[in-house]
Amino acid sequence: MHPDEFRRHAHALVDWMADYLRDVGTLPITSAVVPGDIRRQVPDAPPLDGEPFEALFDDFRRIIVPGMTHWNHPGWFAYFPCNNSPPSILGEMLTAAMGAQGMSWATSPAATELEQVVMDWLRQMLGLPEGFAGVIQDTASTATLVALLTARERATSGRAGKLGLAESGPALTVYASAEAHSSIDKAVKLAGYGLDQLRRIPTDEAFGLRPEALGQAIAEDRSAGRVPACVVATIGNTMPLGVVASAH
């Protein structure tokens, strides 16, 4: 696609996006399609030749949009909002245009250093002391997995990552509220703890984790020779706030 052609199509897309953000409140929040409706409107086999961009954009409006759930609808109260905003959309357009690769400093120095600055801003906004640091993850579920991996390595002094959990010492245990998100279960499995080592701690009438029940569970695991590795803190009952690791 020639840059001039790209410019023309991009203007059309931005016009559509601006109209969508303005009018999303007039759309149905959830789709009326039934399973298979979208697939039936898309060819079973890949095309042999490319189609004009206008045709693809028309397919998007005719097939895709009616099959979407509009998480940024003002009447959407399920789960959590879609976490996008007009400034963030524009920012994604810029990073997509450059094909920014942020996996290390060498691949995009500006991306790495900007992330470091923004994370330190967040530390200051939360009132955390100097020395706290972190990295931006793509989803809360990924952040949960990274935190559980970090807790695993702390609890085993790095042996789990080097030798594997089977060779790193006693079984590690994880503690989470009975209201914690399902991503905890997935991360416990992916990080190698095993679901049998996840302790679901009962909650009180306000759905808060009961400290006395947590203390009892930790004491029982220590008596059995297991090593408490982390406690998952939850705000609300949809997403985990984070993980606090302890090998003691």
Image: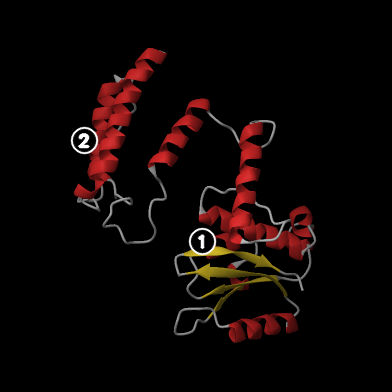
Q: Quadrant of the C terminus?
A: bottom right
Q: CA distance from mark 1 to mark 2?
A: 34 Å
Residue 55 position (above or below residue 155): above
Classify residue 4 by image quadrant.
top left
Position in image of residue 224 (x %, y %): 73, 82
The residue carrying mark 1 is 183
Corner quadrant of residue 194: bottom right
Q: Secondary structure at mark 1?
A: helix
Q: Nearer the viewer, residue 56 or 212?
A: 212
> Compared with residue 149, is residue 216 higher up or lower down, i.e. above or below?
below
At label 1, the amino acid type is Ser
In the image: residue 2, left or right of residue 63: right
Task: Name which residue lies at 53% across and 69% down.
Answer: 234
Bin the neighbour count of mark 1 within 10 Å (Cα to Cα): few under 14, some 14-19, many 20 and up: some
Q: Residues within 10 Å of mark 2 (few under 14, many from 20)?
A: few
Horizontally, is 170 left or right of 107 in the view? Answer: right
Point out residue 48 in the picture as x, y percentages from the top left corner.
Answer: 33, 19
Asked if one can make out residue 135 in the rendered structure from this viewpoint, the answer is: no
Q: Which residue is mark 2?
A: 62
Tell me which amino acid carries mark 2: Arg
